[in-house]
Amino acid sequence: MINSTHVSYFKLAAYFDTGIFRYLCFTIVMLLYILALCANVFLIVVICMNRSLHEPMYIFLCSLFMNELYGSTGLFPFLLIQILSDIHTVSASFCFLQVFCVHFYGQCEFFILAVMSYDRYLAICHPLQYNTLMTSNKVVILTAFVWLFSVLATVAMMSLSVPLQLCGNIINKVYCDNYSIVKLACSDTTVNNIYGIIYMFTIIFSLIILILYTYIKILKVCFSGSKQTRQKAVSTCTPHLASLLNFSFGSFFEIMQSRFNMSNVPIMLRIFLSLYFLTCQPLFNPVMYGLNLTKIRIICKSLTFGKRK
């Protein structure tokens, strides 16, 4: 058995020879990365520079866009290098670094979306008490908790994976992820599995329950209120719900692909769907929220004013 510290590199086996099309792939990926960077940076600057947008919802949006920048930078430059490379290998240290980046991004994204659903619940279901319930201090605490907890959870996961004894170094993907490395272990992975199960049934399910609860309450307001109130409530939640469903779809397929045999699925489709939540979400969110930024603000103020009357 070989200790993981003695594995000097990992081979990414999902890459295949695309011939001259590698330059087309490189150009497409580079354009996607540039678009993601520009869109997210632009919206962060808009929110920071516009004092009228210094409200809880936009602070959480700014945090979301910052996470998109982080996730994009953790993947896109690596993909660009690998696309032009003839030998698809990555050093062990860099592979573990990418594992940290990818998993931290995913956890942080889900936490931020859950906090945003709670914020929408307070704004729509308790408009009169919103400013009291969602204070600036509470916004800071929630934002700090999301980032710090995501760091701690990812560090805990990495502390269990790095010391594993590995019997191979071939990862059947185009990037490094934790479970692919755990599957290479020839030492006992019981603790890793227990940690994953506990995390799934405590943290993830708790966030899912929170999101479902908030949207059930929001739907009650939609159906019990006037047609105008219902339309306003649906409009202000549409970007968030679309973002949540988009991210959940990509994450679900990635989890299914990691745990089950997907060899009957075409390789190109597997690669696309495994990259979906890491590549499409950083572009999807700026488009959804960017197009609705001014509209959402007008709707929220109108909805709150209507409730007060």
Image (spheres, helix red, strand yellow):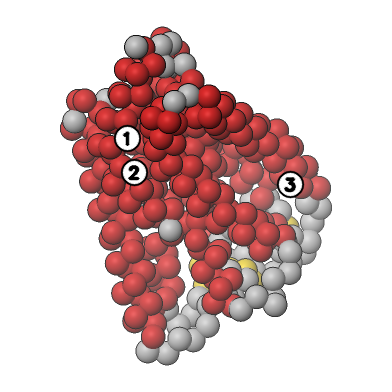
Q: Which residue is mark 2?
A: 289
The x and y percentages for residue 121 are 49, 25
**How many residues crowd around disc 1 within 10 Å: few (fewer than 14), some, or many (20 or more)?**
many
Q: For the residues carrying marks 1 and 3, which lies nearer the camera in this image?
A: 1
Point 34% across, 81% down: residue: 23
Q: For the residues carrying marks 1 and 2, which lies nearer the camera in this image?
A: 1
> Which amino acid does the dot numbered 1 rest on?
Ile
Which badge, 1 or 3, is on the more N-terminal residue?
A: 3
285 and 28: which one is in front?
A: 285
Determine if residue 40 is in view.
Answer: no
Residue at disc 2, secondary structure: helix
Q: Residue furthest front?
A: 227
Q: Which residue is mark 3?
A: 192
Q: Is 102 drawn above or below residue 116 in the view shown?
A: below
> Which amino acid does the dot numbered 2 rest on?
Tyr
Decide if residue 167 is on the left or right side of residue 235. Answer: right
Task: Say if mark 1 contacts mark 2, CB within 8 Å.
Answer: yes
Residue at disc 1, secondary structure: helix
